[in-house]
Amino acid sequence: QFGEMRGTSGCMRRLFGVLHAMAAHTAPVLLVGESGTGKELAARGLHQESPRAKAPFVALNCGGIAENLFESELFGHEKGAFTDAKERKDGAFQRADRGTLFLDEIGELPLHAQAKLLRALETGEVRRVGGGAPSYPRVRVVAATNRNLEEEVARGRFREDLFFRLAVLGVHLPPLRERVEDLEILVQSVCERMKGAVKVQPSA
């Protein structure tokens, strides 16, 4: 077990060992795997098992942000910075200060947003939209994608420098079809969470 992830297969035991080792570091982590492989659970586990466990864990779905709101969501904004900015707002970086920022679906970011994220990662400097003075939140970044970012780099759809900045530590999460022996413990886990509301009977 690692965080809320469970498994008895050899590949999952190896994965848990790698994640435990990564949790002790502060370097960025890139989690790669198909949808449903537990990337957010892995990210939460990395946070919970790290020295930052008592600080915030902030998750941001990069695929669900409108392009014109990306800077505001990530870096925050000042009151009056744009039409709907009726008050000052912290972005994900400020909210995750001293903790972990989880950037899910990182492969969905448009190129111009990738450039702005790269600058923040390189300099540590975060500046609110419409703001002057920068801040320097101390954040560990964990990113996740179901895309092959190396192929995306080769096709010009993802910045190579951002890829290397995010993939300091990288790990692949295997799909369930490659670890069918884990199905029983996963079903047991679901039943426990449902607290008796569901039961599973073996087929005849």
Image (cartoon, rainbow, N blue to C red):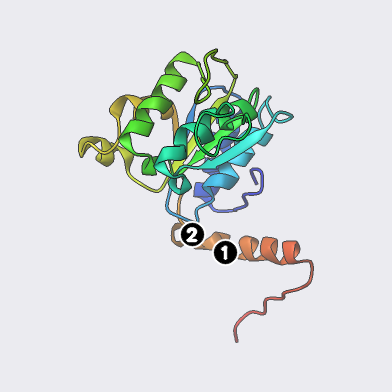
* Viewer-nearest residue: 157 or 39: 157
Res 32 visible = no
| Residue tagged 2 | 176
Foreground residue among 157 and 66:
66
User: Measured along the vertical axis of the image, is residue 137 above or below residue 188?
Assistant: above
Q: Which residue is mark 1?
A: 183
- Is there a contact, CB below 8 Å, between mark 1 and mark 2? yes
Relative to residue 30, is residue 16 drawn left or right?
right
Q: Residue at x 51, y 33 (%)?
A: 72
Question: Mark 1 or mark 2: which comes first in sequence?
Answer: 2
**Which SS class for mark 1?**
helix
Where residue 67 appears, as percent x and y from the top left, is 40, 41
User: How many labels, in total?
Assistant: 2
Looking at the image, residue 198 lies above or below residue 118: below
Q: Quadrant of residue 26?
A: top right
Residue at the (51%, 20%) spot, across then down: 127
Type of the residue with mark 1: Leu
* Position of residue 123 measured from the top left corner of the image (x, y, whole percent): 45, 14
The foreground one among 127 and 78 is 78
Residue furthest out toward the left: 155
Please tell me whether mark 2 sits on a helix, a strand or a loop: helix
- Residue furthest to the right in view is 195
* Residue 60 appears in the picture as rendered: yes
Measured as percent of width and height from the top left, residue 83 is found at: 51, 37
